[in-house]
Image: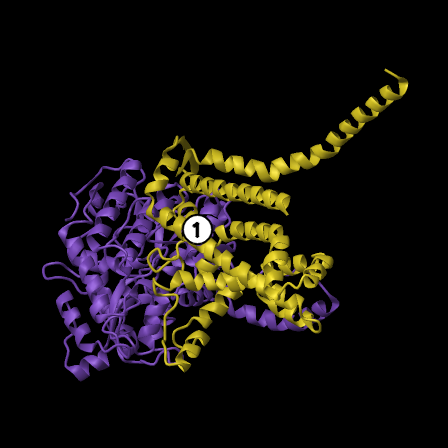
Amino acid sequence: MTTTAIADASAAREERLWRWLMLTPTGLLLALFSILPILNLFALSFLNVAWKDGRAEISAAGLSHYAALPSDNLFRAGLFNTIVFAIFAVLGQLVLGFVLALLTSRVRRGSVIFRTIFILPILIPGIVIGAIWKLMYNPDFGLINQMFGLVGLGPFDWLKSSDTALMSVIIVDIWHWMPFCFLLFLAGIESLPQDVYEAAELDGASWWQELIYVTLPMMMPTILVTAAFRIIVAFKVFDEVYLLTSGGPGTSTEVVSFTIYQRFFTEDRAGYGASMSVVVIFIVALMLVLALAARRRTGAAT
Amino acid sequence: MTSKPNGSTTRRAVLGAGAILPLAMSRSIAFAQAKQVPITIVINQSPWFNSFRQTVEHYEKETGNKVNLDVNPFAGSLEKQRNSVRASNGQYDILIMNSGWFAEMYAGGFLEAITDIDPAFKLDKDVYTLGDTVYYDAAKKVMTPAGKLMSMPISPLIPLLYYRGDLYKQNGLKVPETFTELEANARKLNNPPKMYGIVQRGARGPHTVAFDFYPYLYGFGGGIFKDQANADYTVTLNNEKGREALDYYIRLAKEAGHPKTAAFDQAEVIQQMVTGHAAHIMMVIAAWSQMDDPNKSAVVDKVEFAPTPHVVGVPSSPGLGHWLGGISKNVPDDRKRAAVEFFRWFQTPKAQIASAKMGAIPISAAAYNDPMSNERRYRWMKPMAESLKHAVNIYQFPEASEVIAILELGLNRAIAGEITSVAALNSMSDEIQAVMAKNGYKTGKLPPLK
């Protein structure tokens, strides 16, 4: 081995060492604040916690909490409604967000006004959103029923009917989170290479063909990432349901976060609530992996 | 009551303080000298809270002692109490506990018996013991006077029947004593959407539809357990009486009630009554003051009160939805003694009568026997005193919150029409039996209803 090669190998070793030294504190912090709580939750899901003489008595529960989940009516209803909620809410947000981003990107003057208006809902705190929409849906004086009243329909009690409650909450979520999709899509559309559009124009492509064959394929990675983010957040929905319907009537708007709240906090069943939480974390993680895989495939294709 | 100081001192503040000092000194003459350390009470924001706040202010004025109130929503109050009593040093001296969770505090060993803090303390002879729920025998795990005095009643809440007296007069109706009479009167007055014969609370919540259903269940002669007082937790919810009660509840809602019963919570039921759209409600007595409040009610002086109906041969059986005050074990001794002093004052007939005049529901028979109960404004007091004799303590075990959650879901689904009453009763019974068995109680269940 030459002197230069030895020096190079030594420098590489030193660089590796420094890299590890620099990364270790961050890694430890990550383990402490992110992984440890999840491991703690996972361990708790195999335990029972009872209180006696002012002290916690912990006993092993084995797999009993996980075994009880499939027969839990509330958890089943919550899981089903959450999936329905996530699919329809995210679809609505993606379509609306994309259409509005496309239209805004074509506005030559005053587009900042549209941007400001479209992103307003995302800036409003959840509790205010609850108050706004509780008023909007009010059967006696709500704006929505007044509009229906103009054409001789209603009044409808949107939040108190099993047939319309979930749809009503989905609409609120679309309104609340559409701006998130809008912002990402607008940034994506505005950064697309213009030469591709110029080429399409030269080839005589119509507006529709441009959208289907140029814009959408090039935007697909952004759409997938946005969809993945939104599905994960939609799966965690809590505040809108809590404020508008509290999971009812019946189980029509029960969502899984609300079920966890009920079991873990209200009923004080820490072990069982932890098992429910672990299952939800697993589902969300699985969706994230699937979305990333899909993005990788799409990215490679485009 | 006190509020937290902001900790900053400016020249203006010092000058202001100088100006206010003489005034404050003259004012302090009217107040008694504080003899106890300040205490903190954790409490929920309920319809009766305002009267409790005024009662506390009255106590502060009379004694000079300071009381801080930590006010929370229903579920939030429970969570704060759990966090405080499970810590090594408690934040709250007095816990205001609901009928759904005081057993959890007793059995968990989180409270100090009042008589352990002050062996000379005696419960006033006129104070209702509310199904003896103020006592707890830790060895036998039962609520009996043979146990220790663990808490002070704060609000003896039970439901009463609220009905429109003016409509009864116009239609020549008799005040209903039985469920048959109530149904007939509700049907007679039902004229939706202008007027609903009865408005019920069917929404799912922390203790919502289940609390509304108890007077029906027990008034039909049914019950959740076979013999709770003797620790026999065999589940009897799904017997014929349980079915009759639930079918009756649902029939009333469908045929003489509000179409949105399954989504109605307490606020909506009260709203229907005060806006003049309900002929009857079965509601916790704490809402009485709203009926005659001209700022909130369109039916001032039109609402009358009666004990909840029942079937022939069974007494009126309102479920206790009362609130008890317990003293935390994990707070310093001087704060425990100060908490006992508050209770000593609170239970006196004088304090109770004053409290009733502020809108509270008294815990002492002395207030119900006072001439004030003959006044038109306090017309609810006589039916209340009558009902308290038959009030039923629904739970005396710490896992009550699990059972309540099962009832809330099952009843709400049945009322919403998601499942039949039979399916609801059978599934609730199975789940309750499983909870009791899991926690080692003597339990069993009936064959499923067909």
Q: Position of residue B169 (x, y in %)?
A: 18, 82
B8 horizontally vs B171: left or right:
right
Q: Chain of mark 1?
A: A
Q: Between residue B260 and residue A196, name the one nearer to us.
A: A196
Badge 1 amino acid: Ile
Judging by colour alone, the chain drawn in purple in this rendered image is B
Q: Residue furthest bottom?
A: B170
Say which chain is yellow: A
Q: Position of residue A150 (x, y in %)?
A: 41, 82
Q: Position of residue A50 (x, y in %)?
A: 39, 37
Label 1: few (<14), some (14–19) or many (≥20) C-alpha neighbours in 10 Å: some
Residue lying farthest to the right in this orientation: A3
Image quadrant where residue A31 sits: top right
Q: Quadrant of residue B113?
A: top left
Residue in view at x 25 percent, y 54 percent: B419
Report x, y in % for residue B366: 28, 65
Left or right, A22 with reference to B128:
right
In-front residue for pair B197/A136: A136
Please name the residue that numbered disc 1 is placed on: A83
Seen in the image, is B190 located left or right of residue B240?
Answer: right
Q: Secondary structure at mark 1?
A: helix
**Which quadrant is the N terminus of chain A positioned in?**
top right
